[in-house]
Each structure stands twice: as C-alpha cells, then as structure tokens.
Amino acid sequence: MKPFTTIDSLADGSLYLPAQLKGLDSFDQLDLLRGAEVARCCITAAQRSDLTWWACLEFSSGYSLEITSSSTLVRGWDEYGTINLALAPSAVSDGDQVGLPELVGFVVGQISILRWQRDGILVDAGIEFRSKDGGEVFSAVAVDIPGAFSMSFPRGAPKNWQFPADEYARVDI
Amino acid sequence: MGGAGNYDDDLKTLAGDTRPAVKGDSASPGAKIGENGVFGRDPNSSGGKSMDIPANGNNSHETLHYD
C-alpha cells in the first residue's frame, strides 16, 4: 500500500480520499467476512492497540485481513488519515507480533466503513465490525499521526481517533 | 506546523542516523526513521518533506512540514 492515498475530485467539487484495498476489487467483497469468527488478532510487538501501524485479523474461515493506514496532505499542511485493507486467503505472518485476546471469538455481522466528512472533504478513515446482534463493536480508525491507527474492542471506547467520534458516518457494506 | 528550516539538517539533528522504515516500525512506509522514533517523509504526499516527532512525556506528536 502507498503511504498516501489518491485524492479523487467528485462532481460536486468535494475531495474524496478513499481507503486503499488489496485483494479486494471493492468494499463489497468484504462481505466474505460476514459471519466469520476471529481466530487471532495481532499487532506489531511493542506497539499498542490504540496506536499501531499494523494489525492483522485472522478468521476461522482461513481469511486474514491486514490493516494499515496512510496519511495524505490536502490543501496546504492539513493531513488526513485513511485506512488500508488487505484481504488474503491465508494467514499473514510477518515480523514480531503480539496477539490481542479481546477480539478472539468475535463473529462479524455488519461491516461498515467509517467516513469522516467536513468542509468538502470525505475521508475513508476506518472500518467497523458489529457483531450479529449489533451489541459488540470493533473498529480500526486512523489517528492524527501519519500511518497510525487506533483499534477499539467490544466493551471499549474509541480512543485517539483523528476527529471526534460523532463526526464519522457509517457507510454499510 | 510548517515552515521550519532545512529538512536534511533538521532530520540529522533530531533523528540522528536513519534507516528506511519497514512494516512494523512506528512510522509510515517509505519514511526514514531514527533510533529515537523521529521519522522523515521525503517526499510526502504533496511532494514536499515532513518530519514527525513522536509524543514524549507531556509533549504530543508533532509534524513539521517543509516545502
């Protein structure tokens, strides 16, 4: 994935900073993960779940979802973080990792992109999984540090997001 | 923040010797990172240069931009 995303100009003059995808032709293919159970969640060793540069979710179906983030300058020195999603049909093993038990056993129900929109700028800033009954939420959202993002787990609150949580809209897959 | 001095000099002063960041580093891919975690981006997404200084104690993360 590139360290920054493309900037698309929309018909209404808005600027759209899309998520970068790998192993996926579109967001719709994330539907493969609906109903899947998280078997392992890991981040780089020595990093924190609320401030990390890499994470991977491995599912019982065999798929893995690698999460990273990019940072793009728009209009001067304003930088916006976007989410990068790489889906693979097998587990990813890369470098020193530490497992996070909070998400193991989580079954994916609703999948949404978390999109921030203000002042004519739309940013695909994160991804959110809701459990089947909607009661539990996992999210990974870009923070205000280039290339970094924050994960929040069921029963945990969003932390370090680049903008206030109520400024993000859910775009359901 | 922006408009700081010379990127190369500032990076050498603040980061010391640097190496290319790799997956798992606390820096953007393609950045040059020092042992203390300070990293530079040359070029950044606008073709300029940026340097990032990690949070430390009461000081929050800071990004310096260079034209």
Image (tube, rainbow, N blue to C red):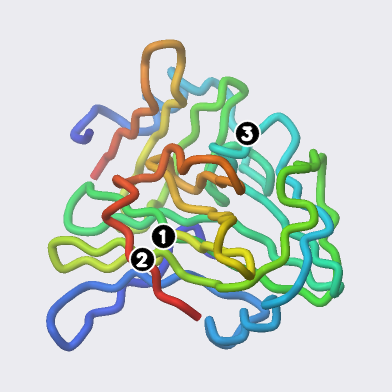
Residue B56 place in picture, x, y as percent:
46, 16
Q: Which residue is mark 1?
A: A125
Residue A26 located left or right of residue A60: left
Looking at the image, tell me whether mark 1 or mark 2 is earlier in sequence order: 2
Q: Which mark is residue A54?
A: none
Task: Decide: few, some or many residues near mark 1? Use Cα within 10 Å; few <14, some 14-19, many ≥20.
Answer: many
Q: Which mark is residue A48?
A: 3
Image quadrant in which the C terminus of chain B is located: top left
Name which residue type carries label 2: Arg
Residue A38 place in picture, x, y as percent:
77, 61
In the structure shown, which secondary structural element does the residue marked by tag 2 occupy? Answer: strand
Looking at the image, tell me whether mark 2 or mark 3 is earlier in sequence order: 3
Name which residue type carries label 3: Arg
Q: A167 or A126, which is in the foreground?
A: A167
Q: CA distance from mark 3 to mark 1?
A: 19 Å
Residue A131 located left or right of residue A13: right
Residue A11 located left or right of residue A56: left
